[in-house]
Image: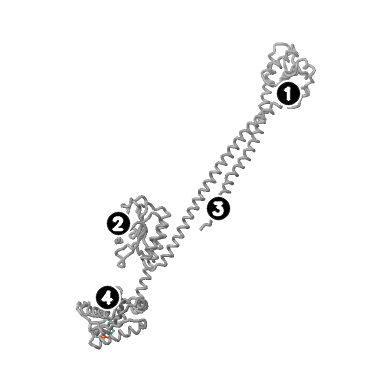
Amino acid sequence: MLPLNQLMLNTRCLLNLTNRIIFLPLTIVFIVSTLSLLLIDYQLRDELHQRVELELTWLAKSAMESLVLLNSPLTLSTVDRVAKHLSLASDARITFIDDSGKVMGDSMIPIDQVPILDNHLNRPEIQLAQVTGIGISRHFSRTLNEEYIYVAIYRSLKVGGGTSGYYARASLPDSTIYYEVIKLRLALASIAIVSMLTLILLSFISSRWIARSVEQDRLDLKSKIDSGIHDIELLHELDSMLGACSELSEAGSVVKQVTPRLLPNSSGAISIYKSSRNKLEFIMFWGEEWQGVTEFKPEQCWALRKGHSHQSDHNDTQIYCEHFSHLAIEQGNKASLCIPLMALGEAIGVMHILKKEFPYSDLLLTNAIAKRVGLAIANIELRYSLRQQAIKDTLTGLFNRRYLFESLEQLVALGMRNKSQIGIIMGDIDHFKSFNDSYGHDAGDDVLKEVAKELKKNTRIADIVCRYGGEEFCIVCPDSTQEETLLIAEKLRLAVAKKEVKLSSKEMVTVTISMGVAMFTNSEDSIKSVISEADRRLYQAKSDGRNCVRGDV
Ligand SMILES: Nc1nc2c(ncn2[C@@H]2O[C@H](COP(=O)(O)OP(=O)(O)OP(=O)(O)O)[C@@H](O)[C@H]2O)c(=O)[nH]1
Protein backbone atom coordinates (compact mmCIF):
# COMPACT_ATOMS: atom_id res chain seq x y z
CA MET A 1 0.00 0.00 0.00
CA LEU A 2 1.40 3.37 -1.02
CA PRO A 3 0.78 5.92 1.78
CA LEU A 4 -0.94 9.15 0.84
CA ASN A 5 1.94 11.38 2.02
CA GLN A 6 4.28 9.38 -0.20
CA LEU A 7 1.90 10.12 -3.05
CA MET A 8 1.91 13.86 -2.23
CA LEU A 9 5.70 13.82 -2.11
CA ASN A 10 5.81 12.20 -5.54
CA THR A 11 3.45 14.86 -6.88
CA ARG A 12 5.57 17.67 -5.44
CA CYS A 13 8.65 16.14 -7.03
CA LEU A 14 6.80 15.99 -10.32
CA LEU A 15 5.84 19.67 -10.07
CA ASN A 16 9.42 20.61 -9.22
CA LEU A 17 10.49 18.61 -12.19
CA THR A 18 7.98 20.50 -14.35
CA ASN A 19 9.42 23.79 -13.11
CA ARG A 20 12.89 22.61 -13.93
CA ILE A 21 11.77 21.36 -17.32
CA ILE A 22 10.21 24.74 -18.19
CA PHE A 23 12.33 27.36 -16.47
CA LEU A 24 15.74 25.89 -17.12
CA PRO A 25 15.34 26.03 -20.92
CA LEU A 26 13.73 29.46 -20.56
CA THR A 27 16.78 30.76 -18.72
CA ILE A 28 19.09 29.19 -21.27
CA VAL A 29 17.05 30.73 -24.13
CA PHE A 30 17.20 34.10 -22.38
CA ILE A 31 21.01 33.97 -21.98
CA VAL A 32 21.56 32.69 -25.52
CA SER A 33 19.27 35.35 -27.04
CA THR A 34 20.93 38.14 -25.04
CA LEU A 35 24.38 37.03 -26.20
CA SER A 36 23.08 36.71 -29.79
CA LEU A 37 21.60 40.19 -29.63
CA LEU A 38 24.91 41.62 -28.39
CA LEU A 39 26.74 39.85 -31.22
CA ILE A 40 24.21 41.03 -33.82
CA ASP A 41 24.45 44.56 -32.42
CA TYR A 42 28.25 44.48 -32.67
CA GLN A 43 28.18 43.09 -36.22
CA LEU A 44 25.52 45.51 -37.37
CA ARG A 45 27.49 48.47 -36.01
CA ASP A 46 30.60 47.24 -37.76
CA GLU A 47 28.65 46.66 -40.98
CA LEU A 48 27.08 50.11 -40.70
CA HIS A 49 30.47 51.76 -40.33
CA GLN A 50 31.77 49.90 -43.35
CA ARG A 51 28.72 50.89 -45.39
CA VAL A 52 29.04 54.52 -44.31
CA GLU A 53 32.70 54.51 -45.30
CA LEU A 54 31.83 52.94 -48.66
CA GLU A 55 29.09 55.48 -49.24
CA LEU A 56 31.40 58.35 -48.29
CA THR A 57 34.07 56.94 -50.63
CA TRP A 58 31.56 56.78 -53.44
CA LEU A 59 30.39 60.34 -52.65
CA ALA A 60 33.96 61.65 -52.54
CA LYS A 61 34.68 60.01 -55.88
CA SER A 62 31.47 61.43 -57.37
CA ALA A 63 32.40 64.87 -56.02
CA MET A 64 35.83 64.56 -57.63
CA GLU A 65 34.19 63.54 -60.93
CA SER A 66 31.90 66.55 -60.71
CA LEU A 67 34.95 68.75 -60.25
CA VAL A 68 36.67 67.12 -63.25
CA LEU A 69 33.57 67.65 -65.39
CA LEU A 70 33.21 71.28 -64.31
CA ASN A 71 33.56 73.46 -67.36
CA SER A 72 34.45 76.59 -65.45
CA PRO A 73 37.77 77.55 -63.90
CA LEU A 74 38.19 76.14 -60.40
CA THR A 75 37.58 79.21 -58.29
CA LEU A 76 36.18 79.44 -54.76
CA SER A 77 32.70 80.29 -56.02
CA THR A 78 32.50 77.52 -58.68
CA VAL A 79 33.99 74.82 -56.48
CA ASP A 80 31.90 75.85 -53.45
CA ARG A 81 28.79 75.82 -55.62
CA VAL A 82 29.59 72.25 -56.75
CA ALA A 83 30.06 71.22 -53.08
CA LYS A 84 26.75 72.75 -51.99
CA HIS A 85 24.98 71.34 -55.04
CA LEU A 86 26.24 67.82 -54.38
CA SER A 87 25.21 67.94 -50.72
CA LEU A 88 21.60 68.46 -51.82
CA ALA A 89 21.55 64.85 -53.06
CA SER A 90 22.77 63.38 -49.75
CA ASP A 91 23.09 64.17 -46.06
CA ALA A 92 26.87 64.09 -46.33
CA ARG A 93 29.11 67.11 -46.09
CA ILE A 94 31.25 67.70 -49.21
CA THR A 95 34.49 69.61 -48.95
CA PHE A 96 36.98 70.48 -51.72
CA ILE A 97 40.55 71.25 -50.71
CA ASP A 98 43.37 72.28 -53.00
CA ASP A 99 46.92 71.03 -53.06
CA SER A 100 48.06 73.62 -50.52
CA GLY A 101 45.43 72.58 -47.94
CA LYS A 102 43.17 75.55 -48.59
CA VAL A 103 39.46 74.82 -48.50
CA MET A 104 37.90 75.65 -51.91
CA GLY A 105 34.32 74.82 -51.04
CA ASP A 106 32.29 73.26 -48.26
CA SER A 107 28.65 72.25 -48.41
CA MET A 108 28.04 73.12 -44.78
CA ILE A 109 30.03 76.34 -44.47
CA PRO A 110 28.72 79.60 -45.93
CA ILE A 111 30.94 80.75 -48.85
CA ASP A 112 32.04 83.91 -47.07
CA GLN A 113 33.50 81.84 -44.20
CA VAL A 114 35.26 79.30 -46.41
CA PRO A 115 38.40 81.40 -46.94
CA ILE A 116 38.90 81.77 -43.20
CA LEU A 117 38.87 78.03 -42.55
CA ASP A 118 42.03 76.33 -41.26
CA ASN A 119 44.53 74.81 -43.60
CA HIS A 120 43.47 71.18 -43.95
CA LEU A 121 46.77 69.61 -44.95
CA ASN A 122 47.27 68.38 -41.40
CA ARG A 123 44.01 66.37 -41.44
CA PRO A 124 44.79 62.63 -41.21
CA GLU A 125 42.50 61.68 -44.13
CA ILE A 126 44.14 64.36 -46.34
CA GLN A 127 47.59 63.15 -45.42
CA LEU A 128 46.59 59.55 -46.19
CA ALA A 129 44.95 60.55 -49.49
CA GLN A 130 48.10 62.42 -50.47
CA VAL A 131 50.07 59.19 -50.11
CA THR A 132 47.60 56.47 -51.21
CA GLY A 133 44.98 58.43 -53.20
CA ILE A 134 42.27 57.75 -50.61
CA GLY A 135 42.20 58.52 -46.91
CA ILE A 136 39.71 57.57 -44.21
CA SER A 137 39.68 58.91 -40.68
CA ARG A 138 37.45 59.81 -37.79
CA HIS A 139 38.14 62.84 -35.67
CA PHE A 140 36.64 65.88 -34.07
CA SER A 141 35.71 68.71 -36.41
CA ARG A 142 36.79 71.99 -34.91
CA THR A 143 34.78 73.81 -37.58
CA LEU A 144 31.49 72.04 -36.86
CA ASN A 145 32.34 71.10 -33.32
CA GLU A 146 31.36 67.43 -33.70
CA GLU A 147 32.91 64.01 -34.25
CA TYR A 148 32.96 63.17 -38.01
CA ILE A 149 33.90 60.30 -40.32
CA TYR A 150 35.90 61.54 -43.26
CA VAL A 151 36.79 59.98 -46.62
CA ALA A 152 39.13 62.02 -48.87
CA ILE A 153 40.10 61.38 -52.51
CA TYR A 154 43.12 63.00 -54.12
CA ARG A 155 43.36 63.64 -57.87
CA SER A 156 45.59 65.78 -60.09
CA LEU A 157 43.45 67.98 -62.34
CA LYS A 158 44.39 69.97 -65.43
CA VAL A 159 43.94 73.56 -64.49
CA GLY A 160 44.74 76.16 -67.19
CA GLY A 161 47.94 74.99 -68.82
CA GLY A 162 49.29 72.97 -65.92
CA THR A 163 48.08 70.41 -63.34
CA SER A 164 47.12 70.92 -59.80
CA GLY A 165 46.11 68.44 -57.10
CA TYR A 166 42.68 68.56 -55.47
CA TYR A 167 41.05 66.71 -52.59
CA ALA A 168 37.39 65.87 -52.60
CA ARG A 169 36.22 64.97 -49.13
CA ALA A 170 32.91 63.51 -48.04
CA SER A 171 32.02 63.31 -44.37
CA LEU A 172 29.15 62.44 -42.04
CA PRO A 173 28.75 63.25 -38.37
CA ASP A 174 29.32 60.20 -36.13
CA SER A 175 26.02 61.00 -34.47
CA THR A 176 24.16 59.97 -37.65
CA ILE A 177 25.63 56.48 -37.37
CA TYR A 178 25.01 56.49 -33.66
CA TYR A 179 21.29 57.25 -34.24
CA GLU A 180 21.11 54.47 -36.82
CA VAL A 181 22.70 52.10 -34.33
CA ILE A 182 20.24 53.21 -31.66
CA LYS A 183 17.34 52.59 -34.07
CA LEU A 184 18.71 49.13 -34.87
CA ARG A 185 19.17 48.37 -31.19
CA LEU A 186 15.63 49.47 -30.47
CA ALA A 187 14.30 47.22 -33.24
CA LEU A 188 16.37 44.27 -31.98
CA ALA A 189 15.37 44.90 -28.38
CA SER A 190 11.70 45.09 -29.36
CA ILE A 191 11.99 41.78 -31.23
CA ALA A 192 13.80 40.24 -28.25
CA ILE A 193 11.23 41.52 -25.74
CA VAL A 194 8.29 40.33 -27.83
CA SER A 195 9.98 36.92 -28.32
CA MET A 196 10.78 36.57 -24.63
CA LEU A 197 7.27 37.59 -23.63
CA THR A 198 5.82 35.09 -26.09
CA LEU A 199 8.17 32.43 -24.77
CA ILE A 200 7.29 33.21 -21.15
CA LEU A 201 3.58 33.14 -22.01
CA LEU A 202 3.94 29.83 -23.84
CA SER A 203 6.03 28.42 -21.00
CA PHE A 204 3.46 29.55 -18.48
CA ILE A 205 0.62 27.99 -20.48
CA SER A 206 2.54 24.76 -21.01
CA SER A 207 3.58 24.60 -17.35
CA ARG A 208 -0.07 25.02 -16.34
CA TRP A 209 -0.98 22.31 -18.82
CA ILE A 210 1.75 19.99 -17.51
CA ALA A 211 0.71 20.70 -13.92
CA ARG A 212 -2.90 19.90 -14.81
CA SER A 213 -2.00 16.67 -16.57
CA VAL A 214 0.33 15.71 -13.70
CA GLU A 215 -2.53 16.34 -11.26
CA GLN A 216 -4.85 14.27 -13.42
CA ASP A 217 -2.26 11.48 -13.56
CA ARG A 218 -1.90 11.71 -9.78
CA LEU A 219 -5.67 11.41 -9.29
CA ASP A 220 -5.84 8.49 -11.75
CA LEU A 221 -2.94 6.82 -9.96
CA LYS A 222 -4.55 7.42 -6.59
CA SER A 223 -7.87 5.96 -7.69
CA LYS A 224 -6.04 2.96 -9.18
CA ILE A 225 -4.11 2.50 -5.93
CA ASP A 226 -7.32 2.88 -3.90
CA SER A 227 -9.14 0.31 -5.99
CA GLY A 228 -6.05 -1.94 -5.86
CA ILE A 229 -6.00 -1.67 -2.05
CA HIS A 230 -9.73 -2.36 -1.96
CA ASP A 231 -9.24 -5.46 -4.13
CA ILE A 232 -6.31 -6.66 -2.03
CA GLU A 233 -8.36 -6.23 1.14
CA LEU A 234 -11.28 -8.11 -0.38
CA LEU A 235 -8.98 -10.90 -1.60
CA HIS A 236 -7.51 -11.09 1.88
CA GLU A 237 -11.01 -11.26 3.35
CA LEU A 238 -11.97 -13.96 0.82
CA ASP A 239 -8.82 -15.86 1.75
CA SER A 240 -9.41 -15.81 5.48
CA MET A 241 -13.16 -16.52 5.17
CA LEU A 242 -12.59 -19.47 2.83
CA GLY A 243 -9.85 -20.76 5.13
CA ALA A 244 -12.36 -20.84 7.97
CA CYS A 245 -15.03 -22.76 5.99
CA SER A 246 -15.50 -26.41 6.80
CA GLU A 247 -18.36 -27.07 4.37
CA LEU A 248 -18.66 -26.45 0.65
CA SER A 249 -22.00 -24.70 1.26
CA GLU A 250 -20.24 -22.22 3.58
CA ALA A 251 -17.55 -21.59 0.98
CA GLY A 252 -20.34 -21.07 -1.58
CA SER A 253 -21.99 -18.33 0.45
CA VAL A 254 -18.61 -16.60 1.01
CA VAL A 255 -17.91 -16.64 -2.74
CA LYS A 256 -21.44 -15.36 -3.38
CA GLN A 257 -20.87 -12.40 -1.04
CA VAL A 258 -17.32 -11.39 -1.92
CA THR A 259 -16.89 -12.12 -5.64
CA PRO A 260 -19.51 -9.59 -6.94
CA ARG A 261 -17.62 -6.87 -5.01
CA LEU A 262 -14.36 -7.84 -6.71
CA LEU A 263 -15.93 -8.38 -10.14
CA PRO A 264 -18.95 -6.05 -10.39
CA ASN A 265 -21.53 -6.81 -13.11
CA SER A 266 -20.43 -10.40 -13.37
CA SER A 267 -22.10 -13.71 -12.71
CA GLY A 268 -20.51 -17.07 -12.43
CA ALA A 269 -20.44 -20.50 -10.94
CA ILE A 270 -18.07 -23.12 -9.63
CA SER A 271 -18.24 -26.78 -10.59
CA ILE A 272 -16.06 -29.53 -9.19
CA TYR A 273 -15.14 -33.01 -10.35
CA LYS A 274 -17.24 -35.88 -9.04
CA SER A 275 -15.21 -38.58 -7.36
CA SER A 276 -15.46 -40.67 -10.54
CA ARG A 277 -13.76 -37.71 -12.33
CA ASN A 278 -15.83 -38.29 -15.45
CA LYS A 279 -18.19 -35.41 -14.72
CA LEU A 280 -18.27 -32.05 -12.99
CA GLU A 281 -21.15 -30.84 -10.89
CA PHE A 282 -22.22 -27.31 -10.07
CA ILE A 283 -21.73 -26.45 -6.38
CA MET A 284 -21.99 -22.65 -6.02
CA PHE A 285 -22.73 -19.46 -7.95
CA TRP A 286 -22.74 -15.65 -7.62
CA GLY A 287 -24.49 -12.82 -9.43
CA GLU A 288 -27.62 -13.74 -11.39
CA GLU A 289 -29.31 -17.02 -10.48
CA TRP A 290 -27.32 -19.76 -12.23
CA GLN A 291 -29.11 -20.77 -15.41
CA GLY A 292 -26.31 -22.91 -16.76
CA VAL A 293 -25.96 -26.68 -16.77
CA THR A 294 -25.44 -28.25 -13.37
CA GLU A 295 -23.52 -31.22 -14.66
CA PHE A 296 -21.16 -31.54 -17.61
CA LYS A 297 -18.28 -33.63 -18.89
CA PRO A 298 -14.68 -32.34 -18.69
CA GLU A 299 -14.46 -32.49 -22.50
CA GLN A 300 -17.18 -29.80 -22.71
CA CYS A 301 -14.87 -27.22 -21.14
CA TRP A 302 -12.01 -25.73 -23.19
CA ALA A 303 -10.19 -24.64 -20.03
CA LEU A 304 -10.06 -28.20 -18.66
CA ARG A 305 -9.03 -29.54 -22.06
CA LYS A 306 -6.28 -26.95 -22.49
CA GLY A 307 -5.17 -27.08 -18.88
CA HIS A 308 -5.36 -23.29 -18.49
CA SER A 309 -7.98 -20.54 -18.59
CA HIS A 310 -10.15 -20.04 -21.68
CA GLN A 311 -11.67 -16.69 -22.63
CA SER A 312 -14.42 -16.87 -25.25
CA ASP A 313 -13.59 -13.52 -26.90
CA HIS A 314 -9.81 -13.88 -26.77
CA ASN A 315 -8.13 -12.38 -29.88
CA ASP A 316 -11.55 -11.36 -31.27
CA THR A 317 -12.78 -14.95 -31.44
CA GLN A 318 -16.14 -16.22 -30.20
CA ILE A 319 -15.25 -19.72 -29.00
CA TYR A 320 -17.50 -20.63 -26.08
CA CYS A 321 -17.21 -23.73 -23.93
CA GLU A 322 -20.00 -26.18 -24.72
CA HIS A 323 -21.39 -26.15 -21.16
CA PHE A 324 -21.60 -22.40 -21.26
CA SER A 325 -22.29 -21.18 -24.79
CA HIS A 326 -26.11 -20.94 -24.60
CA LEU A 327 -25.86 -18.73 -21.50
CA ALA A 328 -23.32 -16.33 -22.96
CA ILE A 329 -25.39 -15.88 -26.10
CA GLU A 330 -28.73 -15.61 -24.26
CA GLN A 331 -27.36 -12.96 -21.92
CA GLY A 332 -26.49 -10.48 -24.64
CA ASN A 333 -23.26 -11.81 -26.09
CA LYS A 334 -21.38 -11.57 -22.83
CA ALA A 335 -17.83 -12.81 -22.81
CA SER A 336 -17.19 -15.97 -20.86
CA LEU A 337 -14.13 -17.10 -18.98
CA CYS A 338 -13.36 -20.54 -17.57
CA ILE A 339 -10.46 -21.02 -15.16
CA PRO A 340 -9.42 -24.47 -13.93
CA LEU A 341 -9.33 -24.71 -10.13
CA MET A 342 -6.00 -26.24 -9.25
CA ALA A 343 -4.81 -27.94 -6.07
CA LEU A 344 -1.47 -29.71 -5.74
CA GLY A 345 -0.98 -29.46 -9.53
CA GLU A 346 -4.27 -31.18 -10.33
CA ALA A 347 -7.52 -29.66 -11.63
CA ILE A 348 -10.26 -30.20 -9.06
CA GLY A 349 -12.91 -28.15 -10.84
CA VAL A 350 -13.54 -25.06 -12.90
CA MET A 351 -14.74 -21.51 -12.23
CA HIS A 352 -16.90 -20.05 -15.04
CA ILE A 353 -17.60 -16.34 -15.28
CA LEU A 354 -19.88 -14.27 -17.51
CA LYS A 355 -19.08 -10.60 -18.03
CA LYS A 356 -19.42 -8.01 -20.77
CA GLU A 357 -15.66 -7.90 -21.19
CA PHE A 358 -12.51 -8.92 -19.37
CA PRO A 359 -9.92 -6.14 -19.08
CA TYR A 360 -6.45 -7.20 -17.96
CA SER A 361 -7.12 -6.16 -14.33
CA ASP A 362 -10.18 -8.45 -14.24
CA LEU A 363 -8.15 -11.35 -15.60
CA LEU A 364 -5.65 -10.87 -12.78
CA LEU A 365 -8.47 -10.74 -10.24
CA THR A 366 -10.30 -13.79 -11.59
CA ASN A 367 -7.07 -15.80 -11.49
CA ALA A 368 -6.45 -14.66 -7.91
CA ILE A 369 -10.02 -15.63 -6.91
CA ALA A 370 -9.79 -18.98 -8.71
CA LYS A 371 -6.51 -19.75 -6.95
CA ARG A 372 -8.04 -19.08 -3.54
CA VAL A 373 -11.31 -20.89 -4.25
CA GLY A 374 -9.42 -23.94 -5.63
CA LEU A 375 -7.26 -24.18 -2.52
CA ALA A 376 -10.25 -23.66 -0.22
CA ILE A 377 -12.28 -26.41 -1.93
CA ALA A 378 -9.29 -28.76 -1.85
CA ASN A 379 -8.84 -28.00 1.87
CA ILE A 380 -12.51 -28.57 2.64
CA GLU A 381 -12.49 -31.85 0.70
CA LEU A 382 -9.27 -32.94 2.37
CA ARG A 383 -10.64 -32.09 5.79
CA TYR A 384 -13.86 -33.89 4.93
CA SER A 385 -12.06 -37.02 3.78
CA LEU A 386 -9.75 -36.97 6.85
CA ARG A 387 -12.79 -36.61 9.09
CA GLN A 388 -14.55 -39.43 7.23
CA GLN A 389 -11.48 -41.60 7.64
CA ALA A 390 -11.42 -40.79 11.33
CA ILE A 391 -15.07 -41.54 11.97
CA LYS A 392 -15.95 -44.21 9.43
CA ASP A 393 -15.20 -47.85 9.04
CA THR A 394 -13.47 -48.44 5.73
CA LEU A 395 -14.97 -51.87 5.03
CA THR A 396 -18.65 -51.14 5.61
CA GLY A 397 -18.77 -47.32 5.35
CA LEU A 398 -20.62 -47.25 8.68
CA PHE A 399 -19.55 -44.97 11.54
CA ASN A 400 -16.88 -46.42 13.82
CA ARG A 401 -16.82 -46.91 17.58
CA ARG A 402 -15.00 -43.58 18.07
CA TYR A 403 -17.80 -41.64 16.36
CA LEU A 404 -20.35 -43.64 18.33
CA PHE A 405 -18.99 -42.42 21.66
CA GLU A 406 -18.46 -38.82 20.40
CA SER A 407 -22.00 -38.49 19.09
CA LEU A 408 -23.55 -40.38 22.01
CA GLU A 409 -22.20 -37.78 24.44
CA GLN A 410 -23.98 -35.01 22.56
CA LEU A 411 -27.15 -37.03 21.92
CA VAL A 412 -27.47 -38.09 25.54
CA ALA A 413 -27.01 -34.51 26.77
CA LEU A 414 -29.61 -33.27 24.29
CA GLY A 415 -32.00 -36.15 24.99
CA MET A 416 -31.86 -35.60 28.74
CA ARG A 417 -32.55 -31.90 28.24
CA ASN A 418 -35.50 -32.66 25.97
CA LYS A 419 -36.62 -35.43 28.29
CA SER A 420 -36.58 -37.91 25.40
CA GLN A 421 -35.27 -41.46 25.51
CA ILE A 422 -32.49 -42.96 23.44
CA GLY A 423 -32.48 -46.58 22.38
CA ILE A 424 -29.30 -48.63 21.94
CA ILE A 425 -29.30 -51.80 19.85
CA MET A 426 -26.27 -54.08 19.90
CA GLY A 427 -26.21 -56.66 17.09
CA ASP A 428 -23.87 -59.57 16.33
CA ILE A 429 -23.90 -61.85 13.27
CA ASP A 430 -24.56 -65.44 14.30
CA HIS A 431 -21.92 -68.12 13.80
CA PHE A 432 -19.75 -65.80 11.84
CA LYS A 433 -16.60 -67.70 12.71
CA SER A 434 -17.93 -70.84 11.09
CA PHE A 435 -19.13 -68.77 8.12
CA ASN A 436 -15.61 -67.44 7.68
CA ASP A 437 -14.22 -70.92 8.07
CA SER A 438 -16.60 -72.33 5.46
CA TYR A 439 -16.57 -69.58 2.82
CA GLY A 440 -13.35 -67.70 3.50
CA HIS A 441 -12.51 -64.28 4.90
CA ASP A 442 -13.38 -62.38 1.68
CA ALA A 443 -16.87 -63.85 1.66
CA GLY A 444 -17.11 -62.83 5.33
CA ASP A 445 -16.23 -59.27 4.31
CA ASP A 446 -18.92 -59.30 1.62
CA VAL A 447 -21.46 -60.42 4.21
CA LEU A 448 -20.36 -57.68 6.60
CA LYS A 449 -20.87 -55.06 3.86
CA GLU A 450 -24.31 -56.35 2.89
CA VAL A 451 -25.46 -56.55 6.53
CA ALA A 452 -24.24 -52.97 7.02
CA LYS A 453 -26.28 -51.86 3.98
CA GLU A 454 -29.40 -53.58 5.31
CA LEU A 455 -28.97 -51.94 8.71
CA LYS A 456 -28.52 -48.52 7.08
CA LYS A 457 -31.47 -49.07 4.73
CA ASN A 458 -33.85 -49.99 7.51
CA THR A 459 -33.06 -47.18 9.94
CA ARG A 460 -33.96 -43.45 9.98
CA ILE A 461 -31.57 -40.66 8.99
CA ALA A 462 -31.39 -39.58 12.61
CA ASP A 463 -30.32 -43.07 13.74
CA ILE A 464 -26.60 -43.74 13.98
CA VAL A 465 -25.47 -47.10 12.64
CA CYS A 466 -21.94 -48.11 13.71
CA ARG A 467 -19.65 -51.05 13.29
CA TYR A 468 -18.76 -51.68 16.91
CA GLY A 469 -16.00 -54.10 16.01
CA GLY A 470 -15.59 -57.40 14.09
CA GLU A 471 -19.07 -58.69 13.25
CA GLU A 472 -20.69 -56.57 15.97
CA PHE A 473 -22.89 -53.50 15.26
CA CYS A 474 -24.41 -50.78 17.40
CA ILE A 475 -27.43 -48.71 16.39
CA VAL A 476 -28.36 -45.55 18.29
CA CYS A 477 -32.02 -44.54 18.00
CA PRO A 478 -32.53 -41.01 19.36
CA ASP A 479 -35.93 -39.90 20.59
CA SER A 480 -37.25 -43.48 20.75
CA THR A 481 -39.11 -45.41 23.49
CA GLN A 482 -38.16 -48.94 24.47
CA GLU A 483 -41.09 -50.35 22.47
CA GLU A 484 -40.06 -48.39 19.39
CA THR A 485 -36.42 -49.49 19.76
CA LEU A 486 -37.44 -53.12 20.12
CA LEU A 487 -39.56 -52.79 16.97
CA ILE A 488 -36.62 -51.27 15.06
CA ALA A 489 -34.36 -54.11 16.26
CA GLU A 490 -36.91 -56.71 15.19
CA LYS A 491 -37.26 -55.01 11.79
CA LEU A 492 -33.48 -55.09 11.36
CA ARG A 493 -33.21 -58.70 12.40
CA LEU A 494 -35.83 -59.71 9.84
CA ALA A 495 -34.23 -57.60 7.10
CA VAL A 496 -30.81 -59.25 7.69
CA ALA A 497 -32.32 -62.74 7.80
CA LYS A 498 -34.15 -62.13 4.53
CA LYS A 499 -31.18 -60.67 2.70
CA GLU A 500 -29.54 -63.02 0.25
CA VAL A 501 -25.88 -62.25 -0.25
CA LYS A 502 -24.28 -63.15 -3.55
CA LEU A 503 -20.70 -64.29 -3.02
CA SER A 504 -17.97 -63.88 -5.62
CA SER A 505 -18.37 -67.62 -6.24
CA LYS A 506 -21.95 -66.70 -7.37
CA GLU A 507 -23.26 -68.71 -4.43
CA MET A 508 -26.24 -67.15 -2.58
CA VAL A 509 -26.05 -67.19 1.24
CA THR A 510 -28.06 -65.81 4.16
CA VAL A 511 -26.97 -64.93 7.70
CA THR A 512 -28.86 -64.10 10.89
CA ILE A 513 -28.20 -61.55 13.56
CA SER A 514 -28.89 -61.52 17.28
CA MET A 515 -29.76 -58.27 19.05
CA GLY A 516 -29.89 -56.80 22.52
CA VAL A 517 -31.69 -53.54 23.39
CA ALA A 518 -31.08 -51.11 26.28
CA MET A 519 -32.31 -47.56 26.97
CA PHE A 520 -31.05 -44.20 28.19
CA THR A 521 -33.97 -43.15 30.35
CA ASN A 522 -32.46 -40.70 32.83
CA SER A 523 -29.38 -38.60 33.32
CA GLU A 524 -27.94 -41.15 35.77
CA ASP A 525 -27.35 -43.64 32.97
CA SER A 526 -23.75 -43.67 31.77
CA ILE A 527 -22.90 -44.47 28.17
CA LYS A 528 -20.75 -47.41 29.15
CA SER A 529 -23.38 -48.93 31.44
CA VAL A 530 -26.15 -48.68 28.81
CA ILE A 531 -23.96 -50.21 26.14
CA SER A 532 -22.94 -52.99 28.53
CA GLU A 533 -26.60 -53.56 29.27
CA ALA A 534 -27.39 -53.84 25.52
CA ASP A 535 -24.40 -56.20 25.17
CA ARG A 536 -25.67 -58.31 28.03
CA ARG A 537 -29.07 -58.58 26.34
CA LEU A 538 -27.31 -59.50 23.08
CA TYR A 539 -25.60 -62.42 24.78
CA GLN A 540 -28.92 -63.37 26.23
CA ALA A 541 -30.30 -63.50 22.67
CA LYS A 542 -27.32 -65.65 21.67
CA SER A 543 -27.94 -68.04 24.49
CA ASP A 544 -31.67 -68.07 23.69
CA GLY A 545 -30.87 -69.62 20.32
CA ARG A 546 -29.69 -66.62 18.25
CA ASN A 547 -31.61 -64.77 15.44
CA CYS A 548 -33.74 -63.00 18.04
CA VAL A 549 -34.03 -59.69 19.92
CA ARG A 550 -33.77 -59.34 23.70
CA GLY A 551 -34.65 -56.38 25.86
CA ASP A 552 -37.05 -55.40 28.64
CA VAL A 553 -40.59 -55.27 27.35
N1 LIG B 1 -14.39 -61.76 7.39
C1 LIG B 1 -14.25 -61.08 8.50
N2 LIG B 1 -14.35 -61.70 9.68
C2 LIG B 1 -14.23 -61.01 10.81
C3 LIG B 1 -14.01 -59.62 10.80
N3 LIG B 1 -13.96 -59.19 12.08
C4 LIG B 1 -14.14 -60.29 12.85
N4 LIG B 1 -14.29 -61.41 12.11
C5 LIG B 1 -14.48 -62.73 12.50
O1 LIG B 1 -15.72 -62.90 13.14
C6 LIG B 1 -15.61 -64.07 13.99
C7 LIG B 1 -16.31 -63.89 15.29
O2 LIG B 1 -16.40 -65.08 15.93
P1 LIG B 1 -16.92 -65.27 17.36
O3 LIG B 1 -16.70 -64.02 18.18
O4 LIG B 1 -16.37 -66.49 17.94
O5 LIG B 1 -18.45 -65.45 17.28
P2 LIG B 1 -19.36 -66.24 16.23
O6 LIG B 1 -18.58 -67.22 15.48
O7 LIG B 1 -20.06 -65.24 15.40
O8 LIG B 1 -20.34 -66.94 17.16
P3 LIG B 1 -21.52 -66.30 17.90
O9 LIG B 1 -21.31 -64.86 18.03
O10 LIG B 1 -21.56 -66.97 19.21
O11 LIG B 1 -22.74 -66.59 17.08
C8 LIG B 1 -14.13 -64.36 14.16
O12 LIG B 1 -13.80 -65.52 13.44
C9 LIG B 1 -13.45 -63.16 13.51
O13 LIG B 1 -12.24 -63.52 12.87
C10 LIG B 1 -13.91 -58.97 9.53
O14 LIG B 1 -13.69 -57.76 9.43
N5 LIG B 1 -14.04 -59.73 8.44
Q: What residue type is labelled 3?
A: Asn
Q: Mark 4: give few (<14), some (14-19) or many (20+) Cα within 10 Å.
A: some
Q: Which amino acid does label 4 sit on?
A: Thr
Q: Is mark 2 within 8 Å of ligand 1?
A: no
Between 251 and 89, the one lying in front of the other is 251
Among the two numbered marks 1 and 3 on one chain, the one whose residue lies closer to the N terminus: 3
Quadrant (top left, top right, bottom left, bottom right) of the C terminus: bottom left
Which label is found at residue 10? 3
Ligand 1 is found in which quarter of the picture? bottom left
Among all residues in the image, which is located at the extreme front?
Answer: 419
Q: Mark 1: give few (<14), some (14-19) or many (20+) Cα within 10 Å.
A: many
Answer yes or no: is residue 436 visible.
no
Q: What residue type is labelled 2?
A: Glu
Residue 380: percent from left, percent from top: 38, 68
Among the two numbered marks 1 and 2 on one chain, the one whose residue lies closer to the N terminus: 1
Question: What is the C-alpha distance between the residues marked 3 and 2?
Answer: 50 Å
Question: What is the C-alpha distance between the residues marked 4 and 2?
Answer: 43 Å
28 is higher (above) or lower (below) than 387:
above
Q: Do the residues labelled 4 and 2 touch (CB within 8 Å)?
A: no
Q: Are marks 4 and 3 in contact (CB under 8 Å)?
A: no
Report helix, strand or loop for mark 4: loop
Among the two numbered marks 4 and 1 on one chain, the one whose residue lies closer to the N terminus: 1
Question: What is the C-alpha distance between the residues marked 4 and 1?
Answer: 146 Å
Q: Badge 1 is on which residue?
A: 129
Between 186 and 132, the one lying in front of the other is 186
Looking at the rendered image, the disc whose residue lies closer to the viewer, 4 or 1, is 4
Which label is found at residue 322? 2
Q: Badge 4 is on which residue?
A: 459
Question: What is the C-alpha distance between the residues marked 4 and 3?
Answer: 73 Å
